[in-house]
Image (tube, helix red, strand yellow):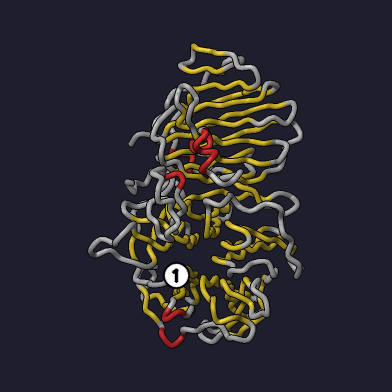
Amino acid sequence: MDPRNDTYFYQEPGSRVGDVIPKYIDGRFEIFYLKGYMGPAPEGAKHGWHHISASSVDRLGPSKPIGVMGGTGDLIRVNGTWHLFACIFPEGKQLVTHYVGIDDSLEHWEYVEEDTFGPDGRIYDLSDWRDPRILWDEAQGLYHMYLCAREKTDHARGGCVGHCVSKDLKHWNYLEPLYAPGRFCGACECPDVFREGDWEYLVFSAYTNLYGTYYVKRRVGSDIWQIPARRFDARAFYAAKTASDGEHRYLFGWNPTKEEDIFGYWPSNRKEKDLRTYDWGGSMVIHEITQDAEGNLWLQAPEEKLRLLGPREELSIPKKGIGYKKETVIPVEQESVTLWEDPGEAFELEVSFSAERSGEMGVLLKADPELKQFYSIVVEPERGRMQYKSHIRCTEEGGKTFPYDVELETFFPVPDDGKYHLQVIVERETGVAYINDKAALSFRMYDRKEGHVGAYIPSDGTILHAGLQRFIEK
């Protein structure tokens, strides 16, 4: 994949984007991420943290290594000097490390070895101590560090967000966890803490009990975290953190590839890549976060990213039936399906629906003309759910081999007017769907390389509008 600055889902050739550490500094997005390589790393490959500097989120050029080794962390500028905190894993331990910027470039760092520290073994178990997030509290005169940690308990569900404070970024005091719900058998990864208006938010990712990136919220001044009913995106979006330019807040995570049997769980007798398990890392996915009056957070396509698309092409909509090549319509009793042309490897398909009752509706991707195989994004109003289904689910063989009812799902508030606006953005095998500017669903499509796009509705439904935008040719 070419790391052009017009790539929608950023990923450099032969590598994967891991955990992203986004910052907005002096009018620019300074985006750091952990770079992983596919298979053996090429000769001369630079491991560790990599850095992208960009004026906006739609144009991310090639990254540069910065000489920081280890896992996720954070950085903060104090009296003109940058301080970076990461994590390392020596001999089965997990420790937080401290680097100091040699200059103001954000690319040259000196390791301060004596400041390395781990969990205390009293409040926090020795097993987990990583992904530090740093905030300065002016009123207290303290730096706050929030970490992926595990509370020391007599049960297995001690996953938490740890909390330490310091006056000098060198000596840290351990406090009780910021968030310890007694819910997770694994530590809460990549914590991010921020404030929007009258609300404080904690974002974290989990890989036991619940899977994906979650957030909790509380009123400023309150000690009680409220747990929203919905997570950010779904299973194929992970390790996300946020950054704001003062007007927009973006959520940066990764959509995992399925290209290397890292964990040894691939089915040995199947050739389909869509049946495989996920890798660590993949393509960078950026959502825009919005906030409602009750402090709930929602996801929509970033307007800046959509600038990568060309002029909108209006698509014709048959009144009923299966239609493709724009002139053919074949009636179907219970469901109406419309197929349009193959849009190529990179595009946005936008379809608006209306349904009087709660029938299923959605869009088709990479479909053959006979509708024998395709990928689909499925909207289920009665469940307030959006699903992704792969081509595997279209066949009898898929019914025998696929062991779950749902592959990927996310939830959204059902609108009172019964109208649904679906945006699906695809670049090669990577995709993301948005519904009503409220929820997002990231996914992968490997086995089918081409095919029609389409939309389908129940017998009482209507396609109100459909449009297509292809990526601008550079």
- List x then y, in percent, for residue 415: 73, 36
Q: Identify which amino acid the numbered label 1 is placed on.
A: Gly
Q: Residue 243's quadrant in the figure?
A: bottom right
Q: Is residue 253 above or below residue 270?
A: below
Q: Is residue 451 among what the camera can see?
A: yes
- List x then y, in percent, for residue 382: 73, 37
For the residue pair 465 and 60, the one nearer the viewer reads as: 465
Residue 309 relative to residue 213: left or right:
left
Outermost residue toward the left in this view:
43
- The residue that appears at 65% across and 71% down in the rendered structure is 157
Count of marks, rendered view? 1
Neighbour tally class for label 1: few under 14, some 14-19, many 20 plus, Cα within 10 Å: many
- The residue that appears at 62% across and 33% down in the rendered structure is 421
Q: Where is mark 1, residue-wise?
A: 71
For the residue pair 226 and 324, the one nearer the viewer reads as: 324
At mark 1, the secondary structure is strand
Q: Residue 135's quadrant in the figure?
A: bottom right
- List x then y, in percent, for residue 394: 52, 33
- The residue that appears at 66% across and 73% down in the rendered structure is 178
- List x then y, in percent, for residue 41: 29, 62
Q: Is residue 183 above or below residue 325?
A: below
Residue 157 relative to residue 102: left or right:
right
* Image quarter (top left, top right, bottom left or bottom right) of the C terminus: top left
Q: Is residue 380 above or below residue 180?
A: above
- The residue that appears at 67% across and 43% down in the rendered structure is 412
Residue 7 relative to residue 252: left or right:
left
Q: Is residue 283 among what the camera can see?
A: no
